[in-house]
Image: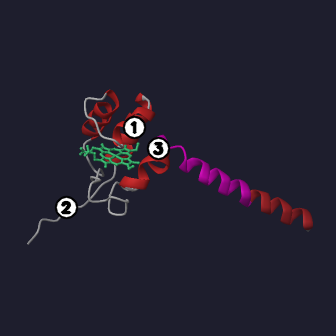
């Protein structure tokens, strides 16, 4: 009986570790979560960031646009005290992956009445 409970415990344990492990399979989400979310939010809505008046929304934006912007911050073509430093931390793959994450967020548009 005890053995059965222990086996069940481990089955549940491994199920959940696998489950949470597969969440981390999205490398773009990982970058967004660990680096960008503080200002842009994990969903790309900059509503909650510290100086949110200055932080743009980046969800559902064209992927190529995000890639170009991040590369411009990285190369110094655009100079910004926060974004230039952040973009310099990212390699090419991370730029592509995180752009993929934010551009893949879908929204439903509603025009004002
Ligand atoms: C410390 C806060 C902060 C963090 C963290 C941060 N950003 Fe930004 N981001 C900003 C601010 C502020 C701007 C506006 C910069 C400007 O005016 O040029 C910006 C601008 C951008 C833009 C340009 C948007 C546009 O339409 O011009 C992109 C793309 C972007 N950020 C992506 C990211 C990504 C991806 C990450 C994570 C790797 C990230 N940011 C992390 C604060 C931040």
From the viewer's perspective, is residue 84 above or below residue 11? above
Q: Quadrant of the N terminus?
A: bottom right
Q: Overall secondary structure of the magenta stretch?
A: helix
User: Which tag, 3 or 1, sits closer to the chain's start?
Assistant: 3
Task: Kindly identify which residue carries mark 2.
Answer: 109
- Secondary element under disc 1, as helix, strand or loop, is helix
Which sits earlier in the primary sequence, circle 2 or circle 3? 3
Q: Point out residue 80 in the picture as x, y percentages from the top left corner.
A: 30, 40
Give the magenta-colored segment's residue range: 12-27
Is 14 magenta? The answer is yes
Residue at image location 33% in from the left, 52% down from the top: 105
Classify mark 3: helix, strand or loop: helix
Answer with left or right where residue 55 lies relative to residue 38: left
Residue 113 location, quadrant? bottom left
Q: Position of residue 37 (x, y in %)?
A: 42, 53
* Residue placed most toward the observer, 67 or 89: 89
Residue drawn at 37 percent across, 60 percent down: 50
Label 3 lies in ligand 1 vicinity (Cβ under 8 Å): yes
The x and y percentages for residue 100 are 36, 41
């Amino acid at each position: 009986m005890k053995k059965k409970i222990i086996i069940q415990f481990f089955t549940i344990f491994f199920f959940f570790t696998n489950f949470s492990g597969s969440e981390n399979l999205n490398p773009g989400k990982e970058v967004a979560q660990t680096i960008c979310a503080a200002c842009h939010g994990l969903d790309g809505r900059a509503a909650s960031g510290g100086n949110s008046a200055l932080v743009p929304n980046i969800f559902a934006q064209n992927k190529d646009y995000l890639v170009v912007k991040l590369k411009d911050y990285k190369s110094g073509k655009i100079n910004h005290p926060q974004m230039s430093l952040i973009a310099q931390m990212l390699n090419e793959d991370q730029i592509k992956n995180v752009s993929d994450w934010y551009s893949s967020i879908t929204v439903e548009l509603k025009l004002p009445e």
